[in-house]
Amino acid sequence: MIHAYVRVCCTFYCQSYGAEGNRSMGVPGEDLAGVYSAKDFVGWYNGLPSCRELSPDLSCETAVVLGQGNVALDVARILLCPLDILKSTDITQLALEALAESKVRRVLIVGRRGPVQVACTIKELREMVNLPDTRPEMVAADFEGVQEAVNDLPRPRKRLTELMLKTAMEVPGEKEQERRKKASRVWGFRFFRSPVEVLSDPDHKRTAGIRLAINMLEGSGESARAVLTGEVEDVTCGLVISSIGYKSLPIDASVPFDSHRAIVPNIMGRVQQATGLYCSGWLKTGPTGVIATTMNNSFDTARSVVEDMDSRRLDVSAGKPGSQSISALLDERGVKPVLFSDWEKIDALETRRGEAIGKPREKLLTVEEMLLEARK
């Protein structure tokens, strides 16, 4: 029991276990074959043991990625990246072999709002723009009025929007025109679209397309809301990857949890109704931001802990058994933890396996393999 650790083992406890659940699209057809969550798809090509058996069907020409954050762009990039580039990364051999046989040549990255509200960073967009053997395919109408709004945007958003405008609207130079002409793969943003239904093939077994509602915006900037117009658009595709967000899951019934917002309710990291319990990361705020955002988020929680110690709200005068008590409990339950020295054995083996085939590492894909190496 986490709460038991708080009371018995230490003066305070901070939860930072992230967001391992998926947000559901909530539309008909999302359970069809050919529909995957970005979390599982990313876990598959990154070697997460729980996603090892995913085996995504990449036999279609067009894939639709729902969402326009960094994860969505990462998924699109993996689907379209030339194999020679992927071979030099730590992507799993299993995924590499599947991608070598992939028939996907076109990826649409769909978002419910417009270019000014896109959630990715300029770094991710730049990598997509410069991806070899690909060319962008945008809808000019999606960018109406965007040029006039650029000057009023904050600097990071302004730079991102300018790169989108340049990619979508400007006539490229001779060298870039030649590169795009030779490209065999296509990607593009589709704005003002929300999923309504995943369409099936005649046998009602596989994904054959997706129906998108066409939206308009109410308001402007970050606070603009997508409102349905009543129009829809069908897109033919055989692969749908949902990257509309993650959500945290409750870890224990004794720990407060807001199931609607999918966070541990807190004020500056202090968990409400549980003195001495703190949280940070996506468990604290919901799945938003990049690594730097989460770092600053954790610093804020640390400041709350220090403030509570200084104000004596948190009693640190009494001695607590801390990790010794936890170690004893694990021994009692027959649980053997993986120490850092054990992880170093796994790391060394993966690195050696990778070097043998010209990669940074080749990952072990099951927990059993990892533990076998760690216990040597």
Image: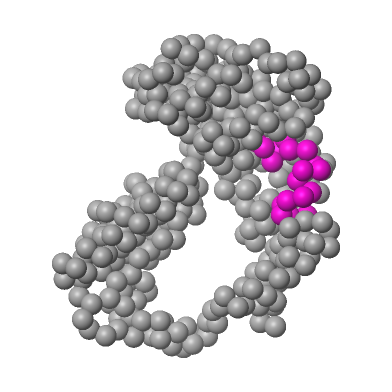
User: How far from the left and from the top, in percent, is residue 107?
Assistant: 67, 30
Compared across the picture, whether 31 is left or right of 279 comes to right
User: How far from the left and from the top, in percent, is residue 227?
Assistant: 40, 21
Compared across the picture, whether 238 is left or right of 126 comes to right
Q: Nearer the viewer, residue 289 or 66?
A: 289
Question: Which of the image's four quarters has the N terminus?
Answer: bottom left
Q: Is 147 located above or below residue 250 in the figure?
A: above
For image coordinates 70% across by 33% down, the residue present is 131
For image coordinates 79% across by 34% down, the residue present is 103
Q: Is residue 98 among the parts visible in the rendering?
A: yes
User: How far from the left and from the top, in percent, is residue 347?
Assistant: 67, 69
Is 42 covered by the magenta stretch? no
Looking at the rendering, the stretch of residues picked out in magenta corresponds to 76-93
For image coordinates 49% across by 54% down, the residue present is 20
Instruction: Give the number of marks.
Output: 0
User: How far from the left and from the top, in percent, is residue 30?
Assistant: 57, 38
Residue 47: image quadrant is bottom right
Q: Is residue 368 among the parts visible in the rendering?
A: no
